Image (cartoon, coloured by chain):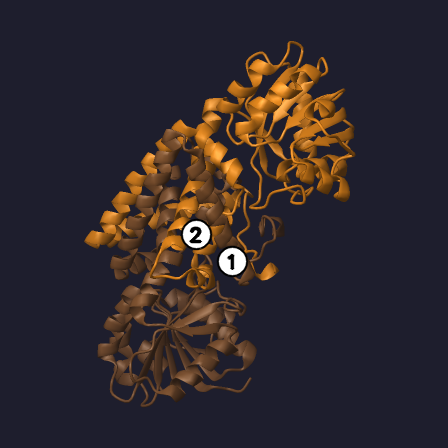
Chain colours: A brown, B orange
Amino acid sequence: MAQLYDRVALIGLGLIAGSMFHAIKRAGLAGEVVGYARSAETRDVAREIGLCDRVVDSAAEAVEGADLVMLCVPVGAMGAVAAEVAPALKQGALVSDVGSTKVAVIEAVAPHLPEGVHFIPAHPLAGTEQSGPRSGFAELFDNLWCLFTPLEGTDPDVLARYKSLWNGMGANVDEMDAPHHDLVLAVTSHTPHLIAYTMVGVADDLQRVTDSEVVKYSAAGFRDFTRIAASDPTMWRDVFLSNKEATLEILGRFTEELFALQRAIRTGDGDHLHDYFTRTRAVRRGIIDAGQDTDMPNFGRNAK
Amino acid sequence: MAQLYDRVALIGLGLIAGSMFHAIKRAGLAGEVVGYARSAETRDVAREIGLCDRVVDSAAEAVEGADLVMLCVPVGAMGAVAAEVAPALKQGALVSDVGSTKVAVIEAVAPHLPEGVHFIPAHPLAGTEQSGPRSGFAELFDNLWCLFTPLEGTDPDVLARYKSLWNGMGANVDEMDAPHHDLVLAVTSHTPHLIAYTMVGVADDLQRVTDSEVVKYSAAGFRDFTRIAASDPTMWRDVFLSNKEATLEILGRFTEELFALQRAIRTGDGDHLHDYFTRTRAVRRGIIDAGQDTDMPNFGRNAK
């Protein structure tokens, strides 16, 4: 694939930025990738393992001369980072981000950006429960989606080039407006994460069932919850604080449905339970048919 | 490994029974395995794919002369099946089951069993989201746990031999009393399943987020919920109806914690969220250290 950007700056060197670096290199999408992370320890690790062509010691230095500046920090840090790099941005540069919520990121970032700099908010729907500079890998985005929430008046050529970058890194790209993005993600990601965190917390907290029992016998379903609930705490704190309304709305719906199922259990209404469980099974089928998961039984467990 | 039983009868030919057949054959643990399923279609499939040495057309015929009779049907069907096979059981035979709840199974099965027949309730903590006679495989139990809930006065030699069977099929065996089993499973399995079912139902039900959006963008966390929520509806209906008290207790705890996190989101209490998410991460570490899951990032997705 042809080179799309002469210089890309990655601000923040966690799972997503690290995977972007590897995916960009795999396809030769950029001339040079410059990296910066706030923590000196992270920068040292990045230099040690060759993450980025060059690792520099300030965000402003990283964006100098960059055609594409990627903000890959927790949502709550986006505004401060945008303010920090704004004076050093090259005219005509594109600024983007990989934040899990979009309304809040747009509010935090857009006001800082100077005239003549483009801004396309983006969110790759990809991740693992791991974090830090060593966690990235080139295949992370393959066949998954990256959602763009472009603002009105976005330059079509800038948008097309940026779309090519994500396609080149393996992802499919969809566009939607930022409020709808935040609602969709509240359903498919934010509320499920909160629920998983809660269930793991309950298990950890229970006096009559020991932690070692929870751990030993986790294969019965709980295991998948702990995987979700092992994700980066700072990232997720910021997600919930910045997508408050949509998350609270979906949580309200969830609680309502849960209470209905709880009543069915208490009253012994087996038909209600059976109907509900049959319906949810069809959703799973749709996800496998869409190629978003494998139907390998018990996937992963035998891979160790 | 030495042969432990001359003849094993599998009543019900779903995921667990099918996996038992393959695991028994892998290690040469039984002379003959006879199978029966209520559905003629299931029996036809079993004969076609060679599941069991012999597939017969009644439960009573299946247990004739069997040293070990495994009840592998949904929990709600255990009592009826026990009543059906009881008159045909061989003196000295061992009856066991693989039900996900144990108090209810003991209440349903024990009264039917004649003098001189042993009964050891068991529950292998293994499964996939798939079901039916084609879904079993020999490796299902490898390195996982099978929980026994033996009744008072169980013959130690019968117990030891039965433990060897599960060890021979790859599983580790633990013993506990039935009420404690049901509480532990309410935490590690039953409540997580109910929550996953609920979340998938909410997503499927929402007007402003389409099913196709839910399916396309499921990689962000929701995907793991749909896997859990694709499990067999009949089995799970029976689990909740037969482990009502423990499930309702854990659900109460879950709701309490969820409301506390919900309030933290509404009031913007980031410290509460961050502390909670940090604590749950440690539980995950314990599960990986215990060998109950792999820490391969994004496991499974790249296996398709």
Is A239 left or right of B139, judged from the image as shown? left
Q: Amino acid at mark 1?
A: Gly
Crowding near pointer 1: few (<14 within 10 Å), some, many (20+)?
Answer: some
The residue at 56%/32% (across/down) is B74
Q: Amino acid at mark 2?
A: Ile
Q: Are marks 2 and 1 on the same chain?
A: yes
Quarter in which the N terminus of chain A is drawn: bottom right
- Percent position (x, y) of residue A154? 32, 84
Residue A19 appearing in the image: yes
- Please give the chain letter of the residue carrying mark 1: A
Q: Which tag, 2 or 1, sits closer to the chain's start?
A: 2
Q: Which residue is mark 1?
A: A286
Is B32 left or right of A290, judged from the image as shown? right
- Percent position (x, y) of residue A237? 30, 56
- Percent position (x, y) of residue B39? 65, 36
The outermost residue toward the top is B115
Q: Nearer the viewer, residue A250 or B297?
A: A250
Residue A217 appearing in the image: no
Q: Residue B110's mark?
A: none
The residue at 23%/72% (across/down) is A107
- Percent position (x, y) of residue B142? 64, 40
Quarter assignment of residue A59: bottom left
Quarter assignment of residue A95: bottom left
Q: Which residue is mark 2?
A: A228
